[in-house]
Amino acid sequence: MADKHLSKQEIREDHFIDWLLEASEYVRARSQVFIAGAMGLVVLIAAITYYNKSQGDSRLEAAALLGEAMIADDNNQGDEATRMAEQLLKEHAGTPAAAQGTLFLANHYYAQGRYGEAQKLYERYLSDYEQVDVLAFAARNGLASCAEAQGDYRQAAAKFQEAATADGGNTEGILALLEAARCYGLAGDAANQKSILTQITKDHADSPAATRAREELAML
């Protein structure tokens, strides 16, 4: 079977998409455990500068629309940002920009108290898109946060544990374990709360989270 040779335009697009996904690491600097916020003005300005909006390719149009939505969000135009993100998902589903737009819109719904709609979008990202670690972690924490916001603390704890397991022991994952322990405490499940806190002190003894875990264990 002959190799498919990419055009120069396709190569440029792929390089940009790779860069855009790497730029999502910006999220790590803006949040510890909970939902990843807007990707930031730096990302979206670069996106719009890089892309020529006159291009007809759906991926280019999707990236430009995501950038516009994030500019509106950065300018505190929440309703307009939500409208454009909804348009992005409707018209350009399946594109890399729509993957990030799915989380972007989920975050907006969460902030508006529309937890059921936010939950569906976090689940959609995990089921429909190739998972980028930082974004998948954000989606799992989004699911946990939705459960907590609706008073299902046991479910929230389980989702935080899932996020921690998938994160593979990184700092964010350890923080997610602390959140899981907190939610078990809210659910009145002191046994699981203590178990997770003890796990943190043993498996991540040198981390700042372990110090906090020891303090919380002392108060149980």
Image (cartoon, helix red, strand yellow):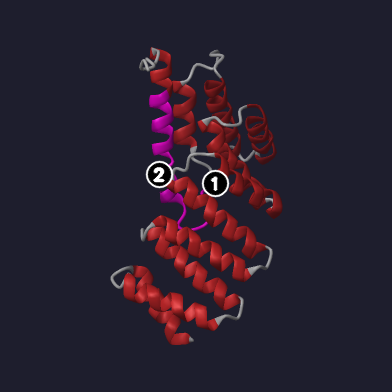
Residue 120 point in image, percent of width and height: 66, 48
Closer-to-camera residue (156/63):
156
Task: Please tell me which residue is depicted at 43% across the width and 33% down the height of the picture.
Answer: 20
SS label for mark 2: loop
Numbered label attached to residue 118: none
Determine whether 23 is above or below 204 in the image.
Answer: above
Q: Which residues are magenta?
A: 14-36
- How many numbered marks appear? 2
Callout 1, which amino acid? Leu
Callout 2, which amino acid? Glu
Quarter of the image where one finds residue 213? bottom left
Residue under numbered circle 1: 126
Residue under numbered circle 2: 25
Q: In the rendered view, does 26 fall on the left or right side of 156?
A: left
Q: Nearer the viewer, mark 2 or mark 1?
A: 1
Task: Please tell me which residue is depicted at 66% across the width and 68% down the height of the picture.
Answer: 152
Residue 48 point in image, percent of width and height: 49, 24
Within-10-Å neighbours for mark 1: few <14, some 14–19, many 20+: some
Q: In the rendered view, does 187 fall on the left or right side of 193?
A: right
Residue 36 point in image, percent of width and height: 51, 49
Quarter of the image where one finds residue 50? top left
Task: Please tell me which residue is depicted at 47% across the width and 29% down the height of the picture.
Answer: 45
Residue 163 point in image, percent of width and height: 48, 58
Of the 4 image quadrants, the one containing the N terminus is top left
- In three-dimensional space, the C-alpha distance between marks 2 and 1, rounded to whole angstroms, equals 18 Å
